[in-house]
Image (cartoon, rainbow, N blue to C red):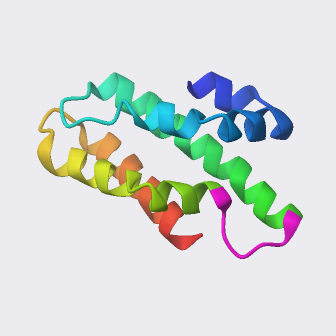
Amino acid sequence: MKNLCATSNQDQLECLVKNGCIDVICSFLDEDISSVLLSHIVDALDSLLYHGREIQQEKNIGENPYGVYLEEKRYLEKLESIINKNNSISNDLILRIDELIHKILRV
């Protein structure tokens, strides 16, 4: 997941997003998720947000389209729920998730 999002070009990522990759990635978000998988998901979403920011700037639109989608689909709530209910998540990963949530809300 992480490498796919980090190494894809803008056109490839737009195609992946149009074909539902955000929903597939976020379908793994569960309160019992392993820290390793959660870390990969956070990295992938962070990479997607980076590319969404490029789209935002390129098209001169007010919001990151991928951030808006994550918020509309309530994936932020899932991330917050995981933070609150999964005791096996490291503080470092909690901070990364918190940063990701704030990136989405700021866009």
Does 98 lie within the magenta span? no
Residue at x-position 66% and y-position 31%: 5
Q: Where the N terminus falls, by quadrant? A: top right
Where 95 sits versus 40, above or below?
A: below
Residue at x-position 25% and y-position 28%: 33
Where 2 sits versus 71, above or below?
A: above
Where 6 sits versus 91, above or below?
A: above
Q: x, y percentage for residue 83?
A: 23, 48
Query: Relative to 30, is 72 on the left or the right?
Result: right
Q: x, y percentage for residue 48?
A: 63, 44
Which contiguous range is marked in magenta? Answer: 59-65
Q: Quadrant of residue 55?
A: bottom right
Residue at x-position 78% and y-position 72%: 61
Which SS does the magenta portion mostly show?
loop
Q: Where the C terminus falls, by quadrant? A: bottom right
Residue sitting nearer the eye, 20 or 48: 20
Where 48 sits versus 32, above or below?
A: below
Q: x, y percentage for residue 60?
A: 84, 72
Does 64 lie within the magenta span? yes
Q: Quadrant of residue 87?
A: top left
